[in-house]
Image: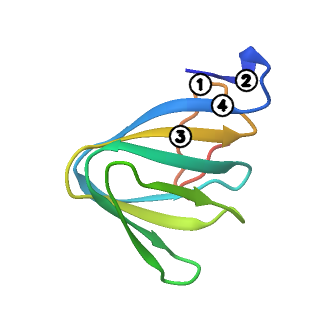
């Protein structure tokens, strides 16, 4: 939705997480804040074991480049804000991060 080419200093993405998981992600070079539009899941912080139920109108932020799992109980739709912004063609590597 908003990528690096827009030169806003942040990025905004519509993120759809399909039912299932856990999905392993770690943004080593990005900070992320997510607003849940629809669906239900659980976010597990692998750094400290904290688990957070995620549902409509919940927002969560990942700082310190948190290593985390997301398990989707249903399809989950998020609005994700990234800093720095994404180019838009990134793919998660095996360690869960972007290049």
Q: Check disc 4 and report the residue beneath it.
A: 11
Asked if marks 2 and 4 touch (Cβ < 8 Å), the reply is yes
SS label for mark 1: loop
Asked if marks 1 and 2 touch (Cβ < 8 Å), the reply is yes
**Position above or below: 55 against 66:** above
Q: Check disc 2 and report the residue beneath it.
A: 4
Residue found at x 52% / y 76%: 46
SS label for mark 2: helix
Q: Which mark is in front, 1 or 3?
A: 3
Label 1 neighbourhood size at 10 Å, few (<14), some (14-19), many (20+)?
some
* Label whose residue precedes the other's in the sequence (2 or 3): 2
Q: What is the CA distance from the residue labelled 2 to the residue labelled 3?
A: 14 Å
* Label whose residue precedes the other's in the sequence (1 or 2): 2
Residue 3, x across and y down, in percent: 66, 23
Q: Quadrant of the N terminus?
A: top right
Q: Check disc 3 and report the residue beneath it.
A: 80
The image quadrant of residue 82 is top right
Q: Quadrant of the C terminus?
A: top right
Residue found at x 48% / y 80%: 50
* Label whose residue precedes the other's in the sequence (3 or 4): 4
Q: Which mark is in front, 2 or 3?
A: 3
Label 4 neighbourhood size at 10 Å, few (<14), some (14-19), many (20+)?
many
Q: Check disc 1 and report the residue beneath it.
A: 88
SS label for mark 4: strand
């Amino acid at each position: 939705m908003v990528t690096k080419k827009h030169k806003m200093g942040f990025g905004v993405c519509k993120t759809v997480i399909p039912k299932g998981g856990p999905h392993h992600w770690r943004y080593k070079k990005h900070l992320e804040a997510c607003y849940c539009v629809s669906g239900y899941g659980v976010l597990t912080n692998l750094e400290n074991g904290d688990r957070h139920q995620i549902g409509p109108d919940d927002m969560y932020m990942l700082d310190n480049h948190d290593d985390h799992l997301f398990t989707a109980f249903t399809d989950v739709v998020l609005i994700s804000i990234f800093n720095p912004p994404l180019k838009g063609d990134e793919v998660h590597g095996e360690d869960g991060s972007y290049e």
